[in-house]
Image (spheres, helix red, strand yellow):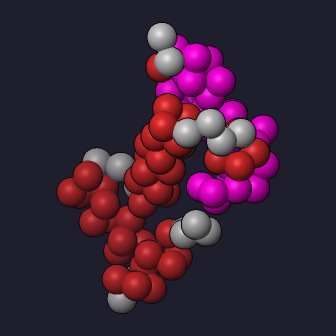
C-alpha cells in the first residue's frame, strides 16, 4: 500500500535512474509498470475471491479513488472491474 518507485530505489540502495535501467534490462518494463501490474493482479484476485465493494478494493490496494481504479483496470484488463467480476462468476 502506497509503494512508489522512489521507495523501491531507496530500499534497493540505488538511484531511481539505475533502478529503472535495471528493470528495463531484466523485465522489459519500468518499475511503475511493475507496481501497476502487481496491483491489478491483486485487484483481480479480490474481485473474484471476495464480495468487497470497489471502494473497499481501491482502499486496500492503494488506489485513492475507485473511479481511478476503474480507469486503470479497464486500460490494463480491457473491461471494467464489475464486468470482470460478473464474467468470473459464470
Q: How many labels does the image show?
A: 0
Name the residue located 48 percent from the left edge and 37 percent from the top edge. Answer: 49
Q: In which quarter of the image is residue 2?
A: bottom right
Query: Main SS type for the magenta part?
Result: helix
Name the residue located 36 percent from the left edge and 49 percent from the top edge. Answer: 29
Q: In which quarter of the image is the N terminus?
A: bottom right
Question: Looking at the image, is 49 positioned above or below residue 2?
Answer: above
Judge whether residue 79 can be spotted in this image.
no
- Which region shows up in magenta? 58-87
- Residue 67 image position (x, y, % from top left): 78, 38
Q: In which quarter of the image is residue 4?
A: bottom right
Task: From the viewer's perspective, tell me whether residue 89 is left or right of residue 54.
Answer: left
Task: From the viewer's perspective, tell me whether residue 34 is left or right of residue 47.
Answer: left
Q: Nearer the viewer, residue 89 or 24?
A: 89
Q: Nearer the viewer, residue 29 or 2?
A: 2
Question: Looking at the image, is 90 positioned above or below residue 82?
Answer: above
In the image, residue 73 lies in the stretch drawn in magenta: yes
Name the residue located 36 percent from the left edge and 88 percent from the top edge. Answer: 13
Question: Looking at the image, is 25 positioned above or below residue 53?
Answer: below
Name the residue located 55 percent from the left edge and 22 percent from the top edge. Answer: 84
- Residue 7 image position (x, y, % from top left): 51, 78
Question: Looking at the image, is 44 positioned above or below residue 63?
Answer: above
Judge whether residue 59 can be spotted in this image.
yes
- Residue 26 image position (x, y, % from top left): 21, 57
Q: Quadrant of residue 55?
A: top right
- Residue 16 image position (x, y, % from top left): 45, 75
Q: Nearer the viewer, residue 7 or 73?
A: 73
In the image, residue 64 lies in the stretch drawn in magenta: yes
Amino acid at each position: 500500500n502506497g509503494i512508489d518507485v522512489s521507495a523501491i530505489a531507496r530500499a534497493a540502495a540505488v538511484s531511481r535512474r539505475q533502478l529503472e535501467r535495471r528493470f528495463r534490462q531484466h523485465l522489459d518494463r519500468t518499475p511503475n509498470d511493475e507496481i501497476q501490474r502487481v496491483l491489478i493482479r491483486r485487484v483481480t484476485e479480490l474481485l473474484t475471491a471476495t464480495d468487497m465493494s470497489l471502494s473497499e478494493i481501491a482502499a486496500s490496494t492503494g488506489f485513492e479513488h475507485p473511479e481511478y481504479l476503474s480507469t486503470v483496470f479497464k486500460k490494463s484488463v480491457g473491461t471494467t472491474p464489475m464486468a470482470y467480476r460478473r464474467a468470473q462468476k459464470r
